[in-house]
Image: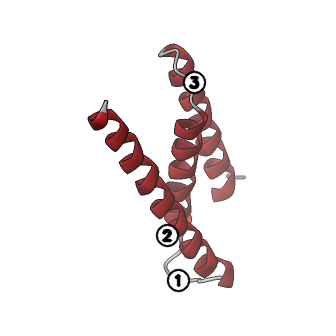
Amino acid sequence: MGYPKKHFAAAGLMGWLFMIIFFLIFIRSIDLTVFLLLVSLGLFVLIEVLDTSFAKPSHIMYLKYWVAVGLVFFVTVIVDKVVRVVQA
């Protein structure tokens, strides 16, 4: 019996989270903003990968809106970080 697609998705997301945590500890720069941005980026990629082409549940439409809001948040934080570096 094979594993459902959601098991692979959960394992991939957990691997991504552990990789982020390991990298932040390795560079000794634990920043909650960077962690949350990378986690949301991984979640957005996962949502796009799990998107089905033939069956469209109603909740997928709402996830697309959340992805758009998250990307706007992601871009604003990145632009804020770049502006802080350039001004310093």
Q: CA distance from mark 1 to mark 2?
A: 22 Å
Q: Quarter of the image for the C terminus: give it.
A: top left
Is residue 6 shown to the viewer in this render?
yes
Q: Which mark is residue 30?
A: 3
**Which residue ends up furthest to the left in the rendered image?**
86
Give residue 3's position: percent from left, percent from top.
68, 51
Q: Is residue 18 above or below residue 10?
A: above
Question: Which of marks 3 and 2 precedes in the sequence?
Answer: 3
Asked which quadrant contains residue 16, the reply is top right
Give residue 42's position: percent from left, percent from top.
53, 48
Instruction: Give the labeled residue for mark 2.
Output: 68
Asked which quadrant contains residue 13, the reply is top right
Q: Foreground mark, 1 or 3? A: 3
Q: Which mark is residue 42?
A: none
Q: CA distance from mark 2 to mark 3?
A: 26 Å
Give residue 18's position: percent from left, percent from top.
61, 30
Q: Amino acid at mark 1?
A: Phe
Q: Is residue 87 above or below residue 46?
A: above
Residue at 59 percent of width and 81 percent of height: 61
Q: Is residue 70 above or below residue 77?
A: below
Q: How is the image coloured?
A: secondary structure
- Of residues 16 and 9, the one nearer the viewer is 16
Residue at 53 percent of width and 58 percent of height: 44
Question: Which of marks 3 and 1 precedes in the sequence?
Answer: 3
Instruction: Give the labeled residue for mark 1.
Output: 54
Say what secondary structure mark 1 lies in: loop
Q: Amino acid at mark 2?
A: Ala
